[in-house]
Image: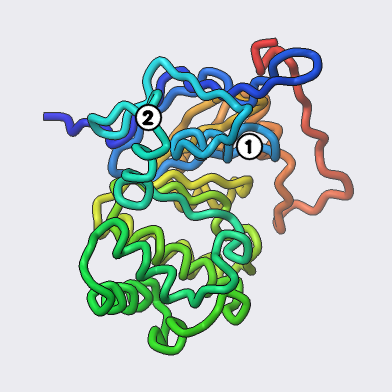
């Protein structure tokens, strides 16, 4: 018997009003997510992050979200109230944002922020929440959890800040994790470490992961499947390990623009764009 998807998205649309009519940030995006690692790639402005925020109910007014289907398990997310979203955010679906400097509360110790998430979604007293936070910090490979627990966000490095964010988002054991550019500001070594932490936790807990990134090399090596977005639409879906065999001109253009050590080029190919790809 085939296991039901954790997340089902069909014809998701996100629209903003503009001076010359509606601006369609996300156009009829459809996909399902099982217990796997799904990558979403594309240029800045392609709708990657907006798709993730729409699933979380985090598109602020005057943005409008609509879909033929938007379901987390058996929960219909369409028309869910803000109170309803607060009940599932963190507990059933969580999102790791790009920069911990802006995502974490700057006047609150990081350990207390993690513990607060546990108390909100799992319950229990202060001591139980603190113990859970320390255990989670250890799970994301932070060597001295007691010391880091007492630090403020400005006192941690970029890589440690991302691990703190991962700990905070996973402490309530959600079914789905959305990671929005979680390694973009990190050097290659720390990127690998952070992704290894994510991989271990996602696989160990049987979660679904959506990794939003502009880094095609990273996504092809880390994920199971890849969605390629252009101007708010999904233009191609393929297995991550076969991304090099992609056929859509936009995906081929993205791949061709990647520099390689094996082939030195004075000029990188220019990425061609066609309004027809966006359905215009």
Q: Which image quarter holds the N terminus?
A: top left
Tell me if residue 158 comes above or below residue 1 in the rendering. below
Residue at x-position 68% and y-position 38%: 43
Q: Position of residue 215 (x, y in %)?
A: 61, 49
Q: Earlier in the sequence, mark 2 or mark 1?
A: 1
- Image quadrant holding the C terminus, namely top right
Residue 262 is situated, as x and y percent measured from the top left of the image, at 70, 56
Callout 1 secondary element: loop
Closer to us: 160 or 22: 22
Question: How far from the left and from the top, in percent, is residue 146?
Answer: 39, 87
Pointer 2 with pointer 1, Cβ within 8 A: no
Q: Is residue 268 left or right of residue 251?
A: right
Is 216 positioned to the left or the right of 8 in the image? right
Binning the other alpha carbons within 10 Å of mark 2 as few (below 14), some (14 to 19) or many (20 upward) gives few
Circle 2: element type:
loop
Residue 60 tag number: none
Front residue of 45/40: it is 45
Q: Position of residue 91 (x, y in %)?
A: 30, 51
Q: Is 212 left, or right, of 142 in this rendering? A: right
Q: Residue at x 82, y 43 (%)?
A: 268
Which residue was labeled with disc 2?
Answer: 80
Residue sitting at 83 percent across and 49 percent down? 265
Which mark is nearer the camera, 2 or 1? 2
Q: Which residue occupies 62% across, 77% down?
A: 154
Q: Which residue is mark 1?
A: 42
């Amino acid at each position: 018997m085939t296991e039901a998807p954790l997340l089902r998205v069909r014809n998701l649309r996100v629209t903003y009003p503009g001076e010359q009519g509606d601006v369609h940030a996300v156009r009829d995006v459809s996909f399902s997510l099982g217990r796997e690692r799904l990558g979403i790639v594309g240029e800045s402005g392609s709708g990657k992050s907006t798709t993730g925020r729409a699933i979380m109910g985090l598109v602020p007014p005057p943005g409008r979200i609509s879909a033929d289907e938007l379901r987390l398990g058996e929960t219909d997310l369409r028309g869910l109230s803000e109170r309803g979203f607060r009940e599932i955010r963190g507990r059933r679906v969580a999102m790791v944002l790009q920069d911990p400097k802006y995502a974490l509360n700057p006047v609150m110790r990081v350990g207390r922020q993690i513990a607060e998430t546990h108390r909100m979604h799992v319950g229990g007293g202060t001591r139980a929440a603190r113990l859970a936070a320390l255990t989670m910090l250890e799970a994301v490979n932070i060597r001295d959890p007691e010391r880091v627990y007492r630090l403020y966000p400005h006192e941690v490095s970029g890589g440690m800040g991302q691990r703190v964010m991962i700990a905070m988002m996973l402490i309530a054991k959600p079914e789905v994790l959305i990671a929005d550019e979680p390694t973009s500001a990190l050097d290659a070594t720390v990127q690998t470490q952070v992704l290894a932490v994510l991989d271990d936790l996602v696989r160990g807990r049987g979660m679904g992961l959506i990794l939003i990134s502009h880094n095609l090399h990273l996504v092809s090596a880390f994920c199971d499947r890849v969605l390629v977005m252009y101007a708010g639409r999904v233009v191609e879906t393929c297995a991550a390990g076969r991304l090099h065999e992609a056929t859509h001109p936009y995906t081929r253009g993205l791949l061709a623009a990647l520099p390689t050590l094996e082939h030195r080029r004075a000029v990188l190919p220019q990425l061609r764009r066609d309004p027809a790809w966006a359905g215009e």
